Image (cartoon, rainbow, N blue to C red):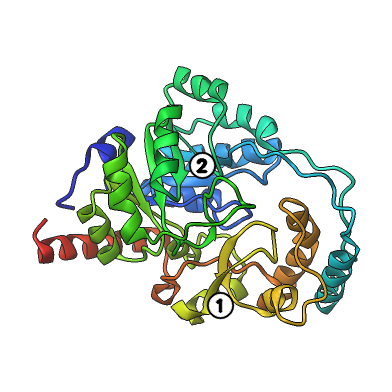
Amino acid sequence: MPVRTPLMTRLGIDLPIIQAPMAGGGDTPELVAAVAEAGGLGSAGATYLTPEALRAASSTVRSRTNRPFAVNLFAPQAVPPRPDDGAAAVAAVTEAGAAVDAPPAELPETMADPFERNFPIALDSGASVFSFTFGLLPDDAVQALKARGIFIMGTATSPADAVALERSGVDAVVAQGAEAGGHRGIFDGASGDPLIGTMALVPQVVDAVSVPVVASGGIMDGRGIAAALALGAQAVQMGTAFLTCAEAGPPECYKQALLDAGPDQTRITRAFSGRPARGIVNRFMDRIEGPDAAAGPLPFPWQNALTRPMRTAAARAGDAGLLSLWAGQGVGLSRRTTAADLMARLAAETEAAVRGIGI
């Protein structure tokens, strides 16, 4: 690899590649460790894990590699009141889930933000990097991370958000373009999304902050990595590219949907979680948000809790039509491989692309 950025040196990685955290099962300890062993930074999306599961996952990663890895949480979120008008949404999810023998959908009586529960576990996980999305960390959390010498990365979808992150004390900013799959790091999920593409966002964030910038969104191969480096990023963060690796967590029907999909088959939806996220269009998205929808999605995290049993049953049944098929617009470049092979190919492709454009 002819490129060596200051961020790579600071993180202790050999390749400018960060495997994106994918809360909900997309990443596994095996994937995180494999990426780390191959010279990148593996990331564990831990928001939905219990403290016990997060401890176990971190222990598994540490048992498989001595190299750096990251743990990711959502920044603290205010949980809106339990919806009073959720009956139609409950009925719609129950009806859809019947196709895979899911239990009747129901809303929990209460929900609590998981940050306070999981942050102390993340501090003790052995991770050298802590990343987060959906806003800013409380100052006491930033100070606790700095006291441990843990590198902090926050996610921005606009230059203004990047500036706010730098002022809050992060060590690097992940500039996440509109092409990205899954939940993007917009600070307020209820407000409008600027939908700034990666190519436009990254250089503006690079100009707006003095900390290193990581490019994210639609990057699937070495050409994308080289382009991000040319825009001023010091590394890239890739999620969709890793979902079809052998070590990744999605069920086979999800992986096959990724391999079969084209870039025109993704859209941003609130159907599964109540918060904007990009995924492959399927029948549940059409059912909840189509012109004949009987009920729209509830706010996050209530919709996420409501659809979880249906998604679990769909994964067990191999029914991709009821799964949240999170994927970025580069999905058409997906390839079935192992994490080690993918990392080697990305390194070779990046080197070829860099030589080709002379940076």
Residue 92, above or below 343 = below
Q: Does residue 272 show up?
A: yes
Residue type, mark 2 in image? Val
Disc 1 crowd rating (10 Å Cα; few below 14, some 14-19, many 20+) is some
Image coordinates of residue 81 in percent, x first then y, are 82, 44
Extreme residue toward the top, this view: 147
Q: Residue at x 77, y 82 (%)?
A: 292
In the rendered image, the quadrant that contains the C terminus is bottom left
Q: Pick the residue in front: 66 or 240.
A: 240
Under tag 1, what secondary structure?
helix
Dividing the picture into quadrants, the one containing residue 278 is bottom right
Image coordinates of residue 135 in percent, x first then y, are 54, 40
Name the disc covering residue 257, or none.
1
Q: Residue at x 23, y 59 (%)?
A: 226
Name the disc covering residue 190, or none.
none
Q: Residue at x 64, y 78 (%)?
A: 282
Q: Which residue is mark 2?
A: 61
Dividing the picture into quadrants, the one containing residue 256 is bottom right
Dividing the picture into quadrants, the one containing residue 149 is top left
Q: Residue at x 36, y 65 (%)?
A: 220
